Structures are given as C-alpha cells and as structure tokens.
Amino acid sequence: MANIKISGFYDEVSGDLKTQLETIKAYGESYLCPRKINGKNIADYTLEEFEKDVKPMLDEYGVKFSSIGSPIGKIGLYDDKAYESQLRKLEELVKICQLMGCKYIRMFSFRGLSGKYDLDLPVVVKRIKGFLEKVKGTDVVLLHENEKRIWADTPERVLELYKAIDDPQFQLCFDASNYVQCGVDVPTAYEMLKDVTVYYHVKDCSPEKVEVPLGLGIGDYQNIINDLVKRGYDGFMTMEPHTGKYADNKKLFHCIGWLFFGIKFEHIDKWRKIFHRIDEAKGIGHTQPVSRRQMMDWQYEALKEMIANAQNASTETKKTQKKEA
C-alpha cells in the first residue's frame, strides 16, 4: 500500500524558521526539507550550532526532516578548493542528519564541466565516491537530484552515473521541472528511472521552461503519482514550487508590458504571458498581489488533490478487479 508523505522546501515561503514551521503545522504536516534556515544555508551549520540554534524549535513544533536540501556537488567539477570545503561541510551534515533521524542528504553531480561528458565522467565518479566516504558506516544516503547544467542532467546520464557509482548509499531523486528545462520528455524520463528512484521533488514547469504552480505545466505529476500509488510507493513528495518570481514580479512585468506596449522585448513578453496564464488559471487579476505563502498553499492543495485522485482511482480499480475475479 502506498504511503506518500509530503515535505517541502519551506524557505520558499520565508527564510525565517518559525514561519516555515508554522506553515508546516498549518497544513497538518510534519516534514521539512531544510535549505535556508534563518538566512543561513543548512550546509553552513556545524552540528553544535544546529543543536543550539535550530533543533530546539524543530522539537517544539514536532517537525522532522525528510531530507537535507544541501548544495553538495553544486560546485565546479575541477575546483579542488571548493571540493575540499564541501567534504568538510558534508561531515557536519552527516552528523546533523543522524541527529535528526533523517536518511537523505540531497546532492548534485557538479558544474563547471569540460563539455566532454565521457572525459568528465571518471572525475565525477571519483568526486562522488569521495563524498560517499563521509557517509560510510552510517545509514545516511546521498540523494542525487537531476538539475540543468550538471553532469547528470538527462535521464540517460542519471542512469549511467547511478550504474557507475553502484553504491547503496547513492540513490536518485526525480525532479520533473528540471527535466523540462533540459528539453527532456518527462513521461520518458519517469519510465526510464522509476525502478531506481527513491525520492521525488514536486516542481512543475511550462513548455517555455518557466516554473509554474503544480498542475499548470507539463511535469506530468498526476500520472506519476497515479503510477506511484499503484506501485505502492512509500516515500516523500517534497514541494519545491520555485514560483517566487511570479509572486514577487507579476505586477511589475504586467506594468512594464503596458508601458512598452507594441515594442517587442522577448524576455519580458514571455514572462508576462506566463504570469497572465497563471492569473487566469487561478482567477485573479493581473495586478492583484500574491504572496509566497499563497504560492505554497496552491502547491500543497494541488498535491493533496493529486494524491487523493490517485488513491481513489486505485481503490476503484481494485473494486472492479474484485468483482471480475
């Protein structure tokens, strides 16, 4: 039986930890994927700082970690100084992960590539195996997220990297929006990777490669969740809307569009049209303000509805199968 747990990058609502936790509890949820906490990246905390400044409030609200949204691996592949720094930070993150009873630390497969993927792969593998040395002897798993402009940004390279690493403490996170932004067909990517994926980010994206509220893009999340429920997925769906640009700039882009009416500014025009599309889908005015909390509310409501739809469909299928048996 499927057991989909909802988490989120609640720093997209606010960098303030208390605001993040109050949002989680307002939804009736219990999980956070920490990234920015009180203006500081989670990777910049030592264990001692975390125990003193962060954990007491987490305990007060009864909030746990689904994964740690670290920036590990989001550095230049050939930047030795940055790599050594991240090795030290990862040591502290592993301790924080263990303290929180959390299984996963999110990571990436490096930027600053040579442009020759075959030549870069051995270096990527060596660097990641260096990270894995920091989790050996623990239950912590490094969770690779596909993202544009890193080595494993397509499903083919994600699978190639997964097989090359071949370590149970190296697993995969699936982000549909990031695939859209790389020009990848999401259903194809899902079919390729569903048997080896253990974690999902929820971030939708328009055909123009701009993040939009869940359900308004081509991230194919309803079909993904339908299949996950059928397959008995027991894991997390972590909300990461990335729609702050809309909340912060929709009125500005609308006004600029009118100010320069008849003059083609491709970038401005693209964003304005997408923002208007969101407005119309949500039934709000083009100059009506939308808060970052409202954006997360939309994400949460849409995700809950998709999960409920999938569960209802699964129940009906089982009833039909039972009648026909």
Image (tube, helix red, strand yellow):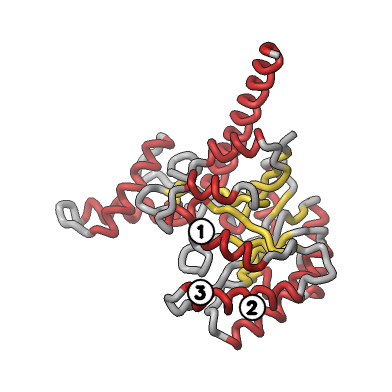
State the residue at coordinates (55%, 53%): 175
Please give the residue where the numbered disc 2 appears in the rendered image. 126
- Relative depth, front residue between 106 and 60: 106
Outermost residue, bottom side = 81
Between discs 1 and 2, the one toward the N terminus? 2
Residue 156 tag number: 1
- Image quadrant of residue 304? top right
Left or right: 176, with 142 as reference point: left
Between discs 3 and 1, the one toward the N terminus? 3
- Relative depth, front residue between 26 and 154: 154
Identity of the amino acid at label 2? Answer: Lys
- Image quadrant of residue 217? top left
Q: Is mark 2 on a helix, strand or loop?
A: helix
- Image quadrant of residue 29? top right
Between discs 2 and 3, the one toward the N terminus? 3
State yes or no: discs 3 and 1 in contact (Cβ < 8 Å): no
Identity of the amino acid at label 1? Answer: Glu
User: Whole-percent x and y of residue 156?
Assistant: 51, 58
Q: Is mark 3 on a helix, strand or loop?
A: loop
State the residue at coordinates (25%, 53%): 257
